[in-house]
Amino acid sequence: MTTELPAAPTPIQRPTERTHHGDTVVDPYEWMRDKTDPEVIAHLEAENAYADARTAHLEGLREQLVKEFVGHTQETDLSVPVRRGDWWYITRTTEGDDYPKFTRLPVQSPSDDDTDPLPPALEPGVLLDGEEVILDAQAMASGQDFFSLGGFRPSPQHDLLAYAVDVAGDERFALEIKDLGSGEVIDQAVTGTGYGLAFSPDQQWLFYTRVDEAWRQHQIWRHRIGSDAAEDVLVIEETDEKFTIGLAPSRDGSTLIIGAASTTTSEYWILDLTDPTGEPVSAGGRRQGVEYDLDHAGDRLVIVHNDGNVGFALAEAPLDDPAAWREVVAAAEGERFESVEAFAQAIVLELRTGGLASVRVFPRRADGSIDVGAAWDISHGGELDTVWADASPNWDQTRLRYQLTSLLTPPTVAEVPMTGGEPIILKRTEVPNFDPSLYVERREWATAADGTRIPLSVMHRKDVTADGTNPGYLYGYGSYEASMDPSFVATRLSLLDRGLVVAIAHIRGGGEMGRPWYEHGKLLQKKNTFTDFVDSARHLIDTGWVAPDRLSAEGRSAGGLLMGAITNLAPELFRAIIAGVPFVDALTTILDPSLPLTVGEWEEWGDPLHDPEVYAYMKEYSPYENIRAVEYPAIFASTSLNDTRVFFVEPAKWVVRLRETVTSDQAERPIVFRCEMVAGHGGRSGRYAKWEQRADELAWLLDQIGATELV
């Protein structure tokens, strides 16, 4: 007996026309953009009901996957305490809770020879003597459909705590300031903010950001604590729609650092926080194509910039003439300097070398100058090791905290002396039921059609061989110079233990191989991103690691655009696709400067509104525009109603057009779509909810590639 499959939702067609550069496009589904329209909501609910029906047979597998995710997670856990002044700040998670508790503990008075003490030993689920809960996110989230914290900042004297709360999923936050002595919230005046908080040293003022209607952080404001928000003062406004603005206090607390950036250009300002009502001073100006990152180093500024250096260079500048940069050292061939942090004892550089994230430490001499000859890199010797600087908020600390991970190395927090030496492992994330000796990880290289070598990070069980029969999973992103570095993701163990070969394709458009890698995957070279991913897929098949009919792929956000493009380009290579919050109607979005973030995106994709060449090029790859009447992979698309970055309408339109165009048997290769009705760009909030969401996606994928059973 067979069960009759439900019919997919078929929204009414209401054609709308747009004409640009002499080209008229008729779109029958653009009307679905209005989320206040009851018909739109009804359609989204019908899509969710259809997805429920098409995946109902996977309920047992979903439950099994959630059990596996939980089984690989030490649910009652804690962070490594971070010292801020005279306090240790701690994050504790508890079994059964979606959200953590934030606590703190006084630092014991250090002895003369121990001015930088190691963090105290903690026990999961047990508060130490003197440890106090300062923020209980689980209690705050109670009764909310969505909850997220967008900021957490103790005051300089540690008697106040500022934090930002979002209960809608639209990444617009309400600020709260709590008196840590009494436990009372003393200020809730400011709402509608972005990311970033900073106190003045006298704790009279709090600096924050605001976003405009296009969800662009465009202003820095100053709020007198305890006053009406109507009295707040605008400190600086970024009027260029290509730029977003942010802030952070310097490590020594003396200076507010304000940065504005587009895709290709930066500008920084510094504001003396001992005069919080003063004016910010530009620290390098704004020159088209010049990007830089800046930190306050006590007696000077330190800058990482690309002015005349494609791989960037480290420079310094005097405080009284912050635009007078003097180069200290430039990146070597194959390196890319990314950001800089300053301490009393050292200057710390985050960089990319050999395609991997790394950290380089430059000790400082007694006069504060930078000792380039004594520089050293943090390394643990693994082929796919990813290293980055971790929370080290104290100006005078003698050790640098960093994190290490790889595909098979759980996140590891360590500290090492600023002058070099043996690292101290503070914590290696406990992963229950995980034996790393059962798996292997390695770097492979695919070859693109133009001869470019594309790095892949690959892992699988040791007992998996290249016999041409294995199921596979390939992940990619390839935009905004973002690097998809090898990192440990516990949910991937459920794929490995079902025999999958799991790989990340480090394709052009990302930043893995330096600035040219990014430049060759954007604007009028964007198609390299898509062909690189296709060539990476072919590599896995041609080398025998993945069966030709069992390869799956996933990308999210701009990686969702990648998924749409590669299914149009080479649908025969893929059996199943997960497209999370996918940017699949790219041309429509980038043509409309009124939409969130669009104008700033023109430096990434080009400006099709004013440039006919860009318009024609984008129309050739935009997924919604190029669906073909051939057999396609099965597709699982997901989004959120309140996403401010990729509107829900993009995948909503895309899946409808897919269903009416492709020739594949949709009983065998379904096209399903889920829309979270209360969530933002990251999907559901809460740990368990996210596990359930991930189990929903992976159960569907495993079913499609015939890999539901543990090996």
Image (tube, rainbow, N blue to C red):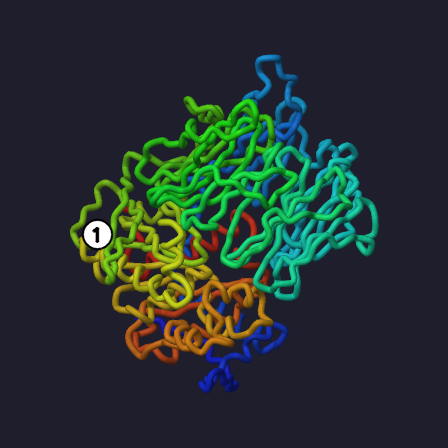
Which residue is located at x 33 percent, y 43 percent?
Answer: 354
Report which residue position mark 1 lands on.
Answer: 545
Q: Amino acid at mark 1?
A: Trp
Q: Is residue 28 left or right of residue 706?
A: right
Drawn side of residue 552 relative to residue 586, left or right: left
Tell me the residue at 55%/56% (across/down).
287
Q: Position of residue 406 (x, y in %)?
A: 37, 40
Residue at left 65%, top 28%? 85
Relative to 353, does residue 286 appear above or below in the rendering? below
Name the outermost residue toward the left: 467
Tag 1, which secondary structure? loop
In the displayed structure, would residue 639 be above or below residue 333? below
Q: Locate residue 481: give its quadrant.
A: bottom left
Q: Is residue 693 above or below residue 660?
A: above
Res 412 seen here: yes
Residue 438 in the image: above or below residue 612? above
Q: Residue furthest top?
A: 112
Q: Quadrant of residue 479?
A: bottom left
- The residue nearer to you, when weighing 361 against 282, is 282
Q: At which x and y percent is residue 516?
A: 37, 54
Quadrant position of the N terminus in the picture: bottom left
Q: Alpha-carbon neighbours of circle 1 within 10 Å: few (<14), some, or many (≥20)?
A: many
Q: In front: 596, or 603? A: 603
What residue sits 75% from the left and 49% below the top? 222
**Residue 485 placed where, x, y %?**
39, 46
